[in-house]
Image (cartoon, rainbow, N blue to C red):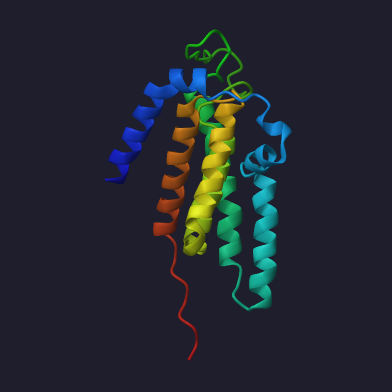
Amino acid sequence: MALGLAAVAIIAALLLDPWARATLVRPRIYDGDFGRLLRVMGYVPTWLLAALALWLHDRAAARGGRRAAWLALAPIATGAAAEVLKLIFRRERPGAIGADYVFRAFDDRLWSTSGLGLPSSHTMVAFGAAAALARIFPEGRWVWYALATGCGLSRVLAEAHWLSDVTVGAVVSIGMVAFAWSRRTPPSPPAA
C-alpha cells in the first residue's frame, strides 16, 4: 500500500513538473524570515543542534540518548543518501537548459553533485528529521511534516528544484526512516 502511494505521488509530481515550474515561482522566497525558516529545515546542523538539546534534556531525565541519536542520524543518513542518489540519477536542476529535464553524462564531473537536483537534499534532510520526530513525538507529527513540506515547496518556489525532485526526496526519506525504525531494538523495560 505504502509503495503504491509513493509511486502514485512520484508519477503525479512528474506529470505536474511543467505546471509547477511555470506556476509555483517565487524566486525571492528566502529574502523573508518565513522562507529562511523553511530552508533551514533542510540544513543538517539545525537538526544536530536540536538533537543536542534533546540529548541534554534526556540525560537530565535519565532517559539515555536514543531519541537524540535518532534525531541526529535520520537527517544525516537521508542527506547522505540524497547525494548518492544525485550521482546515480544525474538530473540537473530546472533551468539548466530550457524547460526540459537535462541529465548530466557520467563522463562529466562523475563525482560532483553540484548542479544536480534529483532528489532535493534539503527536502530529504527535512523529511528525514520530520519522520524521526514523528516517531519520537507522534502528537506533533503534523507540525514536523508541515515544516518539511514547506521546505520542499520552498525549493520549488525558489526555482532550485522540480516538484518531482522534492517528491522523490520526501518519499525516499520517509521510507528510509520507517525502514530503520522497524529494525530498531525496542527499549528495555524499566527495572522493577
Give above or below for 24 relative to 177: above
> From this viewpoint, is residue 101 visible?
yes
- What x and y, as percent, mark residue 125? 57, 43
Residue 15 to residue 32: above or below: above
Whether residue 78 is visible to the viewer of this picture, yes or no, is no
Q: Quadrant of the N terminus?
A: top left
**Vertical arrangement, residue 123 with respect to residue 59, above or below:** above
Q: Residue furthest bottom?
A: 192
Identify the residue at image location x=44%, y=54%: 180
Q: Residue at x 49, y 52 (%)?
A: 131
In the image, 7 versus 148, the foreground residue is 148
Residue 123 x, y percent position in the rendering: 55, 38
Residue 87: percent from the left, percent from the top?
A: 53, 26
Q: Residue furthest top?
A: 98
- Is 71 placed left or right of 169 in the picture? right
Q: Residue at x 56, y 8 (%)?
A: 97
Write down the quadrant of residue 155 in the picture: top right
Query: How many numbered discs, if any?
Result: 0
As drawn, is 185 to the left or to the right of 44?
left
Q: Residue 101's spot in the image, x, y percent?
A: 47, 14
Camera-nearest residue between 158 and 83: 158
